[in-house]
Amino acid sequence: MSLHDRFAEVRSGLQLRMRGARSEIVTDPEPEWATGFHRIQDDLRQRRPVARTERFGGAWLGTRYEDVSATAHDAECFSSRAFVVGNVRPPLGAAPVGVLPPASSDLPFHRGARRLLSSAFSRASVARLEPVTRAYCHGLIDALAGRDQVEAVSEYTQLIPTHLMVTLLGFPEQDAPRVQHFATSTLQDVNVSAETRSDRAGERLTYLPAQIHDHLDHPRDDLTTRVLEAELNGRELDPLHVYGTLAALLVADIDTTASAIGAALLHLATTPADRARLVAESALLPTAEEELLRAHAPVMTARPVTRDMRWRDADMKAEDWVLMSFPSANRDPAEFDRADNRHVAFGLGIHRCIGAHLGQMELRVALEVRLERFPEFSLPDPSTVTWTAGQVRGPKTLPIHIGPAAPAGGQA
């Protein structure tokens, strides 16, 4: 069977697996979960550190650092075969590969699947992307010249990681809005019905195989071609592995990075002293970036429970979800000393984000360019800020007031 024929089976195979998934309809999380996120989790950390929530289709929520860390490192009790919680349960038997490898892979398969991508996200590879990222950020700022108010999410924070991922994967630049929608809907729409979720996933099942076929016909120097040409244990990758890896890269980078940049901008827009100090002392930005990641970590990831058990005074059942709240773990006073910021914004254990260097670079460059070009910006009306309410928490809308744009100084 040719590669084209093998990849032609991807869509039908995935659709069958989705139709077989267990589902239930739940209501959207109340707005308080988004706006009072840290207050709620601070309270839970004190009263009931492993609590039960009916949000996200029902899940256990770990809020202490020690419990989050234990979950991340215990592959026997908590599988990695799915990490996006919701009302569609992961299919049984998906491990060790999972539907979005390597993020959804258990050991020992995970080790080789992750190694296939590590060079693309190494510190050296990311450094080569920095001039392109900086130039793109300057271009976005140029487009805002002459205005006194901008919507920072749709006009800046979301565009940066989407552009970079489209470039890395070798997808058409004009497809960036479509790719962005794939990423945000996966993580933000966890409480829609199974039918709606399936329909939205169907858009990916059309788009990604088409890109795969195009790369098979026209190989080029990009990450998609490298994944297609890769071998694992002496064999070419299964088509579902290729599809799942590309889908995982879209899910894992775009919405998470945009949320981190947005939360950082919101902090600086509402804390003038911090913003003024970073403008005056730009050398402090790397340290500030790490503290912003600790204080405003955007991501919670999920693990399915492998068996019925009592864990941390919670009676868990096989196939229950456990959510690891890295944002709450980062604020656990029992673990963190401000002088030693060992934050877990990028996760823990074997699934620590493979794109950590990329996300850190995007955040740093986005802030550097913003502060260089718009050293003065503020939030006129806090009530206009809305938040995402899924596993990734960040500003969904962020209208900020800006002063005149300074000319680009060190534009690459």
Image (tube, rainbow, N blue to C red):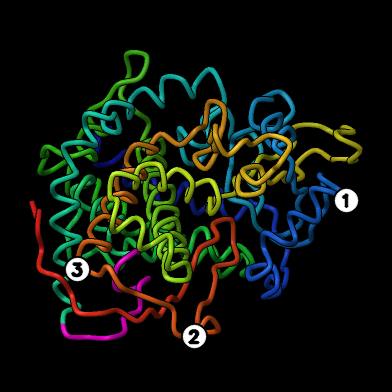
| Disc 1 to disc 3, C-alpha distance | 45 Å
Amino acid carrying mark 1 in the image: Arg
Is 42 placed above or below 383 here? Answer: above
In the rendered structure, the answer to whether residue 312 lies left or right of residue 393 reads right
Number of marks in the image? 3
Report if residue 148 lies within the magenta region: yes
| Disc 2 to disc 1, C-alpha distance | 33 Å
* Mark positioned earlier in the residue sequence (3 or 2): 3
At x 44%, y 84%, the residue is 380
* Mark positioned earlier in the residue sequence (1 or 3): 1
**Dot 2 lies on which element?**
loop
Q: In the rendered image, which residue does mark 3 sit on?
A: 140
Is 336 placed above or below 251 here? Answer: above
82, 42: nearer the viewer: 42
At x 47%, y 61%, the residue is 263
Mark 3 Cα-neighbour bin, 10 Å: few <14, some 14–19, many ≥20: some
At x 20%, y 36%, the residue is 127
Q: Position of residue 295 (x, y in %)?
A: 55, 51
Magenta residues span: 146-157
Q: In the rendered image, which residue does mark 1 sit on?
A: 47
Amino acid carrying mark 3 in the image: Leu
250, 16: nearer the viewer: 250
Please tell me in which quadrant of the rendered image residue 217 appears.
top left
Q: In the rendered image, which residue does mark 2 sit on?
A: 381
203, 40: nearer the viewer: 40
**Dot 3 lies on which element?**
helix
127, 289: nearer the viewer: 289
Amino acid carrying mark 2 in the image: Asp
At x 10%, y 53%, the residue is 410
Q: Position of residue 145 (x, y in %)?
A: 16, 79
